[in-house]
Amino acid sequence: MRIDLHTHSTASDGTEAPAQVVAAAAAAGLDVVALTDHDTTAGWADAEDAARHHGIALVRGTEVSARAAGISIHLLSYLQDPAHPALAVELDRTRDARLNRARQIVELLAADVPITWDDVLAQSRDAVVVGRPHIADALVARGVVPDRDAAFAHLLASSGPYHVPHYAPDGTDAVRAIRAAGGVPVFAHPGADARGHIVPDRVFDRLAAAGLAGLEVHHRDHSPAQRARLTAIADRLGLLVTGSSDYHGDGKANRLGENLTAPEVLAAIEEQGTTKVVRP
Ligand code: AMP
Ligand code: ZN
Ligand code: FE
Ligand code: FE
């Protein structure tokens, strides 16, 4: 069983439509794929149709933006009720904040490089969530940088002069909201220290006490040392361990199936979730 529990589509900042992501997952030989767009469930319906068509199982999820210890973190929510207000209201608020923040980033950038808000809108067409990758695509279209990676290296870096943070719920509140909505919360890439700051150990204790179910240990942004640290934390706190690609289509080098989750871990997630895995 090949199970990849973290992918993005054009509903957020991936480059392929939800149905294309599912088709690509089937073509890559996966048995199960999760669609986990940032702060939205907008891609679920198309992904579900495609999963039935291509004979692959689909886990419906969301990558929820949150904050902890002054740092931006991501929590994967699996199998939640998308209509439950506890989570839906928070996601609404985050999407609004992301939109304002993206406008602010573009305003700052426009002082120094050729870019307009319309450029970004032309790139974020189907997206219901606007992110820095769309601004990166606008910079690529303008010939300012060759690709998304180059844009993130300086102009869009979290530590850079044009960065603007956005509202996101506190991590413990987000974990509780995910659980209230019947979802299963897994901390996404918690040890990605090359991307920016990572949370200290005490945050794992707080999130676990709030209902965290697991840690995404196997992810390309994790060094062997981080995987060892996170495995030990998961053991200590009785958390599930997942692995996934964080596929963004052509927007990132991450390939479908490059990291996988064990079938018994998916079974535990499904047991805790409110909605079912869509099976062919
Ligand atoms: P945002 O959600 O707007 O803060 O933007 C962060 C998103 O950009 C994350 O989903 C990352 O996957 C993506 N990202 C971060 N670094 C890079 C990079 N070097 N190349 C492409 N995408 C990136
Ligand atoms: Zn992303
Ligand atoms: Fe993420
Ligand atoms: Fe992601």
Image (spheres, rainbow, N blue to C red):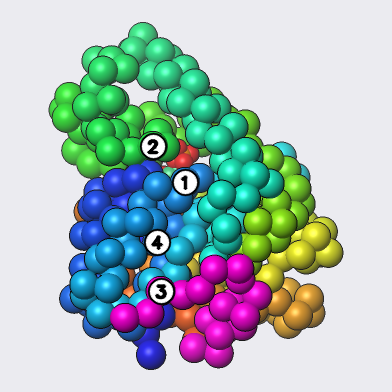
N-term mark: 4 or 1? 4
Q: Is residue 255 visible?
A: no
What amino acid type is highlighted by mark number 1? Thr
| Quadrant where the image shows the C terminus | bottom left
What amino acid type is highlighted by mark number 2? Val
Front residue (pair 35, 116): 35
N-term mark: 2 or 1? 1
Residue sitting farthest toward the front: 83
N-term mark: 3 or 1? 1
Give the secondary structure at mark 1. loop
| Residue 29 image position (x, y, % from top left) | 24, 82
Q: Nearer the viewer, mark 3 or mark 4?
A: 3
- Read off the magenta span: 263-280
Q: Residue at the spot x=62%, y=63% of the render?
A: 183
| Residue 103 image position (x, y, % from top left) | 42, 19
Give the secondary structure at mark 3. loop
Q: Are marks 3 and 4 in contact (CB under 8 Å)?
A: no
In the picture provided, is 208 more to the left or to the right than 105? right
Q: Residue at the spot x=23%, y=52% of the render?
A: 16
Q: Quadrant of residue 187?
A: bottom right
Give the secondary structure at mark 4. strand
Q: Alpha carbon of mark 2 to alpha carbon of mark 3: how far?
A: 23 Å
- Residue where numbered disc 2 is placed: 128
Q: Quadrant of residue 184?
A: bottom right
- Residue where numbered disc 4 is placed: 35
- Residue where numbered disc 1 is placed: 40
What amino acid type is highlighted by mark number 4? Leu
